[in-house]
Image (cartoon, rainbow, N blue to C red):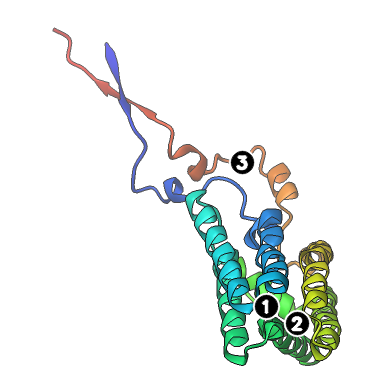
Amino acid sequence: MTSEKLIDGDPNDPGDDIPDGPPPTLLEQMGGLSGLVSSTLPILVFVPVNNKWGLNPALIAALSMATLILVWRLIRKENLQPAISGFMGVGIGAAIAWYTGSAKGYFAYGIWMSLLLAIVFFISILVRWPMVGIIWKGINGDGMTWQKVPGARWAYTWATLGWAVVFLARFLVKQLFYQADNVTGLGVVSILMGWPLTGLVTIFTVWMVRCARTAMIDAGYETDDDSDETDTTDAAPDPASTSSKPTLRKEPTRDH
């Protein structure tokens, strides 16, 4: 006669540490649609408050809005990176405006940062190390073998060019309003050329990233997950998928 003892899976099995769910998408890493939209809220309060009550109240209003966004995302346990970056940008812009005593100084940081990013992205294309490829693979913890695959490198180049054009366009257009001391125009342009353009170039980037992955698969540097699942249907089960399940161990018992 035998008895069965229920034994839990090995807690030291590395399969138990594998995170559930797919990795975050590019839009999620940027804070999602809400993160893109909320980045314009400090500008929405800064411009009208400045027009009615002056610079100092406008700076307080913009900083307060950026703080509320940061606290809101913290309470909801959402990705804080976009909120922190936005808060720092508002803080730097507010400091410049306060130091210069001019409301247009609030937008100076964003204007010159756009030019800097455009230059960096264009240079990365010229040296055949497009920034989108470096950033994308860096975020996902992958290697840089894509640089050796012409198809992947060209896909990342087009994506990088899209961002470079957006950054340069923002600089040129905003600079016109900045030189004209048109604070209201700067606010409107910052919103129109903010998250709407970011959303469009993000969609284009996702498409190019998929093209790059296809080129990597064709070159043999990556595998297609769908085909892997099909080919391994009859293979031995993955230990990671079974490590958390209890196993049955039979132990002999003495007959009395």
**Mark 1 vs mark 2, CA separation in Å:** 7 Å
Helix, strand or loop at disc 3? loop
Q: Quadrant of the N terminus?
A: top left
Q: Quadrant of residue 64?
A: bottom right
Looking at the image, which residue sits at the far front?
A: 53
Instruction: Classify 56 as above or below 129.
Output: above
Of residues 133 and 44, the one nearer the viewer is 44
Helix, strand or loop at disc 1? helix
Tell me, yes or no, whether the two marked residues, 3 and 1, touch with CB atoms within 8 Å.
no
The numbered dot on residue 130 is 2
Residue 165: % across, % down: 85, 80
10 Å crowding of disc 1: few (<14), some (14-19), many (20+): some
Tell me, yes or no, whether the two marked residues, 3 and 2, touch with CB atoms within 8 Å.
no
Helix, strand or loop at disc 2? loop
**Mark 3 vs mark 1, CA separation in Å:** 35 Å
**Mark 3 vs mark 2, CA separation in Å:** 39 Å
10 Å crowding of disc 3: few (<14), some (14-19), many (20+): few
Q: Quadrant of residue 110?
A: bottom right
Kind of residue sitting beneath label 3: Ala
Instruction: Classify 148 as above or below 139.
Output: below
Where is mark 1, residue-wise?
134
Residue 18: % across, % down: 49, 50
Q: Which one is in front in this view, the residue at disc 3 or the one at disc 1? A: 1
Choose the circle earlier in sequence order: 3 or 2.
Answer: 2
